[in-house]
Image (cartoon, rainbow, N blue to C red):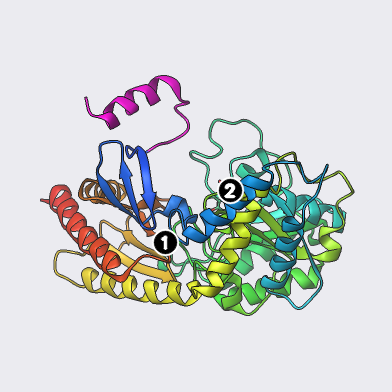
Amino acid sequence: MTNAAELKARRENAVAKGVSTRGIYAVRAQNSELWDADGKRFIDFAAGIAVNNAGHRHPRLIEAVTKQLEAFTHTCFHVAPYESYIRLAERLNAATPGDFAKKTMLVTTGAEAVENAVKMARAFTGRSGVIAFSGAFHGRTLLGMALCGKVAPYKKAFGAMPPEVFHIAFPNGYHGVTPEMSLAQLDQLFKSSIDPDRVAAIIIEPVQGEGGFNIADFDFLKKLRQVADDHGILLIADEVQSGIARTGKMFAFEHAGVAADLVTMAKGLAGGFPLSAVTGRAEVVDAAPVGGIGGTYAGNPLAVAAANAMLDIIEDEGLCARATEIGARITARLKSIAAQQGMEPIGDVRGLGAMIAFELVKNRETRDPDPALTQAIVAEAEARGLIILPCGTRANVIRLLPPLTTPGDQVDEALDLLEAAIEAAIMKTYG
Ligand code: PMP
């Protein structure tokens, strides 16, 4: 039995089945490479699901965390606060879009950031309704799963959802949902289900992550901002996956040139240390009563040190520009692969910066999803030493999330592996 096979057997015996896992048992990782328990090398184009934006173990991140380890590891910000948390809040207030006074709270996971943003919106507006989108992913906590716009597996077995959560269709040009249709659904929702005066917030991922890397039309985001303003509804940008330089800007919302009232971020923020944040209008953030938000580990000093280092790295190494470059390089190659004969199952190639995806279909005309081929490509890539992730409400999208520090030759190596994997998977699936 190989080491990985042995770990798999132990994992099956000891770890909850509902926690999904791949077969790659990590032992070591550096920048864009990862080695597993059998000593096999992988190029990691999952980056811990959009977390290691500056690669694994960036030296400046390790240095900052090591320094913090030697000072203190935990005091609880509620008990003995520290300067690094305050500095990070100041920096996030300055970095998020919007020319207004802002404040920040730190928590630990993306779901927690989302929960806290909704709590703030409810406290500020005195309203309870929340509107989210089909295909959305906002986390696995009770409210998080209610906000998700996909039933299986997120809310299939888990009983009653928290009330006052409504969904409208996310615009998706490839599948014929126009921005106008989404706005019409919002209008209809106000007529049929909830008075806009009772809606606290609309929450949207500017680029849907788990839902399939669907990019919100920028003009649609502007119009959504307008509708929210017309009704005193707050706009929450969930930038947990799309934020922190991933799309070529610090936050994907910046592409649309409008500001959300609250921004949630996590994942790339601390490059692998558990940290998330809600940053937004000072008066909204401050609406939550003292003691009503926070947590024992919220804003852990090691994770905060990592986040402060991460913001320096993004700036000093020009990671926003790097995201745009890598994204253009990968998207161009994918488009040329898709144009080859035999590659008809690649129905769509899309991306914003280094948040890139391609959609697998049984037929380019009907655009029927091909989840089996999608799984096969992921498996073939893994066999060749490339880690990629599937996503999409129809499980037929492959997303590429390269670390923004990936050297050019490894980007090309990964794309060669991917092309071979797609060819092999198509061959096996369609003969
Ligand atoms: N929001 C978005 C947009 C996400 O992509 C995710 C995680 N995939 C979450 C929230 C939840 O984050 P976490 O898993 O850290 O709770």
The quarter holding residue 146 reads top right
Front residue of 302/288: it is: 302
Q: Residue at x 26, y 48 (%)?
A: 41
Residue under label 2: 148
Task: Name the N-terminal-most of marks 1 and 2.
Answer: 2
Q: Which numbered disc covers residue 11? A: none
Residue 102 placed where, x, y %?
79, 68
Residue hosting label 1? 403
Residue 18 part of the magenta segment = yes
Residue 330 location in percent, x, y?
32, 70
Residue behind label 2 places its C-beta within 8 angstroms of ligand 1: no
Q: SS of the residue at dot 2? A: loop
Q: Quadrant of residue 360?
A: bottom left
Can residue 46 be seen here?
yes
Percent across and percent down for residue 5 are: 27, 28
Identify the residue at image location x=48%, y=52%: 210
Q: Secondary structure at mark 1?
A: loop
Mark whose residue sits in front, 1 or 2: 1
Q: Residues within 10 Å of mark 2 (few under 14, many from 20)?
A: many
Which stretch is magenta? Answer: 1-21
Residue in view at x 25 percent, y 68 percent: 412
